[in-house]
Image: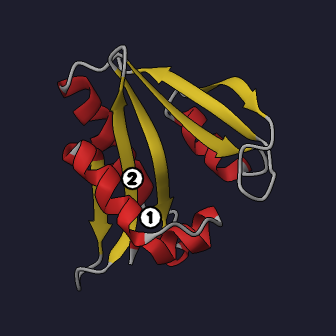
Amino acid sequence: MIADIVRDSLHENYDHSLYLSLGQQWPDGFLVAADALGRPIGFLLGVMQVDREGRILMFAVDRDHRARGVGTQLMQAFLDRCRTQGLRRVTLEVRVSNATAIRFYTDFRFSVVDLLRTYYSDGEDGYQMARDTA
């Protein structure tokens, strides 16, 4: 279940209705990778924002399925969908302590554009990262 991946990977606990509500805003921005039995193993939830900009709100891969290309496929599909929709830029937020995710995003040409003090519910700082879709 996606909520389990969020709890384990992102250290956040959201009401289940949040995923449905956000996913309805832009269904093409809610991507889910599943195993052979149809169980979610990763997901990316993005929204369209003003000024032709996409924003990744949540992105995680189940711990047992990391380093197998799942995240890469989800990110590439999302960026392709952003380009198809004519979006020019994509942003996201990441914990400053998450070096693995920061490296992953950097490999996709995201760069840090801002430091977000006490951004996360536990008080940790975050980075806002962004990239052009071209």
Q: Quadrant of residue 35?
A: bottom left
Residue 66 on image: x %, y %:
51, 66
Spatial CA distance of label 2 from label 1 is: 16 Å
The answer to whether residue 130 is above or below residue 40 is above
Q: Which mark is residue 44?
A: 2
Callout 2–callout 1 Cβ contact below 8 Å? no
The answer to whether residue 13 is above or below residue 20 is below
Outermost residue toward the bottom? 37
**Disc 1 target residue:** 68
Label 2 neighbour load within 10 Å: few <14, some 14-19, many 20+: many
Q: Residue at x 45, y 41 (%)?
A: 56
Q: Residue at x 47, y 69 (%)?
A: 15
Pick the quarter of the image with the N terminus.
Answer: bottom left
- Label 2 sits on a secondary structure element that is strand
Front residue of 26/67: it is 26
Residue 65 on image: x %, y %:
46, 72
Q: Amino acid at mark 2?
A: Leu
Q: Quadrant of residue 87?
A: top left
Q: Quadrant of residue 31?
A: bottom left
- Label 1 sits on a secondary structure element that is loop
Label 1 neighbour load within 10 Å: few <14, some 14-19, many 20+: few
Q: Amino acid at mark 1?
A: Arg
